[in-house]
Amino acid sequence: MRIIFVRHGESEGNLQGKIQGREDYCLSPSGVRQAKKLKNYFSNQKLVISHLYSSPLKRAFETAKILSELWEIEIKAEPGLQEYDMGRLSGADKETLEEKIPETKKYRVEPADEYFDRIQSKNLLGVESAFEARERATRTLDAFFQKHDDDNVILCVSHGGIMQRFVEIVLGTNRMWKIEIRNTAIFDFDLQSQSHKAMESGNFRDNIIVNKINSFNDDVHLMKS
């Protein structure tokens, strides 16, 4: 199965410096242009997909709608692709966050820690923890493997926070990695279903299957006029 993850174009929330979470922002004019550049890039690459999934949040679904013009394919809303639930922080200004919600100070490791990566489950802010987000991403990827064959090509339009967890799972690492994922950046993987089963069972010795990274955080399309 080939699976391609794409972050949505710039949203009005990105533009305004908001912590977005599940707050439902539309694409900004710049985000629309980014999505169109990505569509042109996929067209030039002659990409043909079999299935198109999107987070149901507007900024992702609007991006998916622009991309879908290439294939006239149905967009399937997939809740598992949604951004982190940021609880009480959803829609808050990043710059004034600690002033407006002082409790955030004890949960935040550094100012750039946008997703509060070390926060525990069932916290008072209502923020989805990295562990919970990773579990959700695992369930979503498992469902894709159950639904699709190795010759399927799946495009998923998602968000910068949860995509980090998807990348970790695809790469089979137990470590958590911080990746600065740019708007409309592409992560493209060829995955064998046997390797996914081996990862679940831990039986790698008898299941030597080589997967492939085709693109990793690639936004070369944005450099073209």
Image (spheres, rainbow, N blue to C red):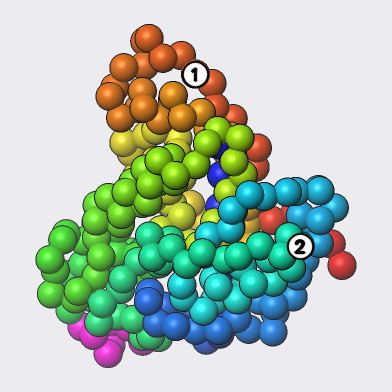
Check residue 67 in the rendering and tell me which mark sits there, or answer none: none
- Give the residues drawn in magenta, as a range: 96-102
User: Where is residue 67 shown, x and y percent of the image?
Assistant: 69, 65
Q: Which one is nearer the viewer's eye here, 93 or 144?
A: 144
Is 39 one of the magenta-colored residues? no
Could you say which is closer to the camera, residue 159 or residue 47?
Answer: 47
Residue at image position (62%, 57%) is 185
Q: Is 47 on the left or on the right of 12, as rendered?
A: right
Q: In this view, does 198 lie above or below 114?
A: above
* Residue 131 in picture, x, y percent from top left: 24, 52
Task: Report if residue 134 is visible in the image.
Answer: no
**Farthest bottom residue in view:** 100
| SS under mark 1 | loop
Res. 215 image quadrant = top right
Amino acid carrying mark 2 in the image: Leu
Q: In the rendering, at what x and y percent does residue 179 appear?
A: 48, 52
